[in-house]
Image: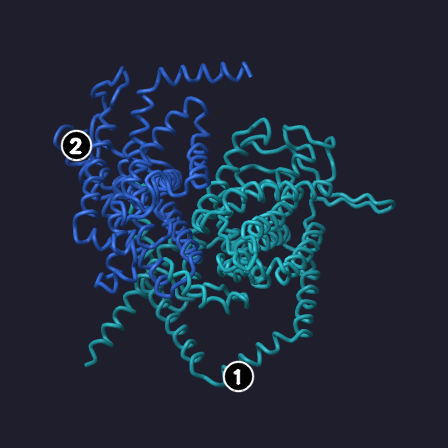
Chain colours: A cyan, B blue
Amino acid sequence: MNLPFIKKFSTKALIILISSELAAVVTGPPGNGDTPWVGFHDSITQKASFFGLFVTGRWALFYAIGIISYLAVHFFKKLNSNNSAMDSLRSQYSSVAKNKYFKLAAVLVIGVLAILLPTVITDPFWREAMVSQIAVFVLLALGLNVVVGFAGLLDLGFVAFYAVGAYATAWCTGALPMPPIFGSHVNPFFAIPIAIILAMVAGVILGIPTLRLRGDYLAIVTLGFGEIITLFANNLTGITGGAQGTKQVPHFSLHIGPLKYIWGLDPVPYYYLVIGFVILFIFIFYSLEHSRVGRAWTAIREDEVAAESLGINPLKYKVMAFAIGAASAGFAGVMTAAQSNFLTPATFTLALSINILVLVIFGGMGSIFGVVFGAIVIQTITMYLIHTPPAGYQPPDLYIYIGALLVIMMIFRPGGLFPARRRQRADVATSSLENSNG
Amino acid sequence: MHGFLSYLNAHFHALRLEFWGLFIGGIGSGIIYAMVAIGYTMVYGVLRLINFAHSEIFMTGAFAGYFTLNYLIGSSSPTGFSSILLIIVGILAGGITGSFFAVVLERVAYRPLRIRKAPKIAYLISAIGASYFLLNLAAKEFGRIGRGIAQPYQNHTVFTIFGAPVEMYNIIIFVAAGIMLIIVDRLVSKTKLGRSIRSVAQDSETASLMGVDIDRTIAMTFVIGGFLGGAAGFLYALNVGVLYSMGFTPALKAFTAAVLGGIGNLRGAVIGGLILGVTESFTVVFFSGAYTDVVAFAILVLVLMFRPTGILGELIGRSA
């Protein structure tokens, strides 16, 4: 008998057992505070049917699923590691994917699909979700991607800029107790520049003192900042309306000569409006990434000392990343304010910051396509869970899955589903550097 | 201007009146911050990173103490020797649970990244993910409403300092935390384990060349930090009860305390915790209760801007 083999095998089996039972607990029925074990106990012992084929305890079902998925991943890895056919397929794919015309065609196809989407989706829930939960979150993820992906700064209070943008819109349109600057009931279009500027100013104000700090300090300071913005929104009743929320924010409207149009309760016109701006922001961020500024960000992210010795001012470019990311969040805030007509501080929580972060991490930090893809996929799943919740699922449980996903992505695929190319190349070099001075 | 001065004058007058009461309250919360801060500081010492999930260690410790005490006490009201025993059991339950979760956290969320030599941002993301996972799993399993803990002792005023009452609770946390802090200080400065922790904190590569088992040392660091964090969670819960999200604010303040005292420095963490607790307690006179959290945050930003090495300076190995 081969003893080391058995030891290795049983360790693996145990790891799979623990993680699949954990999955059973996470997806199982909730417990309560009086009898601590009831949630765990029910989650493991309840009967469940395996696609209607046979009925067994949840623990066995999850263990079976765990083993099957482990074997599948293992098999796939084997297939990937020594299979020349697979390699040639991949190289063919990557050469096609790099082709300029292929890229153009893919962008066009995605664009046409995006335009045709409202004709396919007619369910009012999904039409609403498409705008307020998916398209707006794509904007937020694109903004956070500039900070986390391009500049490598972990911002855990990104929701603060979103809140600044949304409240700035409410302010300009006269929905706050604080008197607006241009008289009340102004079209939210006029609020866009003000909201973006205010969000950028907030980014600069937060950035200048904190961006000199090391990465981990920055993360905790931004975390605190996000909490404090919510605290102020809740308690400064005379300015923000407090926990009660704002008065009504008007919809967008257009009056140019003979052209008159008012965005109303129908989400579809909002969808096209947001999609238009998403494309604009993608274009801007793509150009930035491939500009001098984008290269400076990469340099700072990979090695700040080396970047500084090459004449790049790290603080300047980091503050710039903060402000540009904040601009996108501020704009998303305008959209949310105008589309939902109403704001409360309860929208802008730390949990939302983590939610935006997971969109960026899942798709791929620094990859615009990845981030958009991640945002669409994760937000669609989130909305699906809200629309048709499985048994025992409560909406806040979402954050269990989000937390687990963050850890799993960091362990198994830190670059995300579609890793940014520049990041891939530099990964090895930086990690050895980081470790030598730590 | 005159209005502002009279505002300050009135509030300073209130501060003079309530000085000792606020001081005692501040020491009480400060020593809890100190215990949590030790966890941050020790992990920072060996791994050079902030353990974002430490707030959830605190929370799990509080829940463990809560369940244990509710089970043991039931509807009785213990006094005398059984009170002391119950508090020790609660501390052990909180501490051991905290250690357990800290070690699991290190194994699951940190070690794979350490083996891969991942960049720092990956650790932070992994830690914040683990923190959110634990936080919301606790919410799902134990409910989303706050609960009071079964009291293992009769709270009453024991004696007064300049007219300010010192309650049984203050004495319990002061004595319990004081003993644990002294033990940890001795542990790190005198024992073999402490020596290996300090050597890893100074230079982990050289330490491993000298035969220090890095993985084991890091795990033991999480055990010690987790024990203090979990026990602190229990002591905190004795006063205010348990809630799934209870860890966030005390942990942010404890982190501030660790930075204030000089991150990586054990005694600094204790001093920072006490200073922060007392300062925060005094500011209650000037701001409404909702803004006391802002005070701690403002202290954090100011310290990071003007003296990022803290009061006693950084590094676990060189000064402790």
> Crowding at label 2, few (<14), some or many (≥20) Cα neighbours within 10 Å?
some
Per the model, the C-alpha gap separating discs 1 and 2 is 72 Å
Provide the residue designation for mark 2: B83
The three-letter code of the residue at mark 1 reads: Ser
Q: In which quarter of the image is residue B30?
A: top left
Is A314 displayed left or right of B58 in the figure? right
Q: Can residue A35 be seen in this view?
A: no
Q: Is the residue marked by circle 1 packed among few (<14), some (14-19), or many (20+) residues within 10 Å?
A: few
Question: Disc 2 marks which amino acid?
Answer: Ser
Position of the C terminus of chain A, as image quadrant, is bottom left
- Of badges 1 and 2, nearer the viewer stands 1
Residue farthest bottom in this picture: A84
Image disc number at residue A88: 1
Where in the figure is residue A282, as x and y percent of width and height? 65, 58
Tell which subunit mark 2 falls on. B
Looking at the rendered structure, the secondary structure element under dot 1 is helix
Q: Position of residue A243 (x, y in %)?
A: 53, 32
**Rendered view: A211 above or below A432:** above
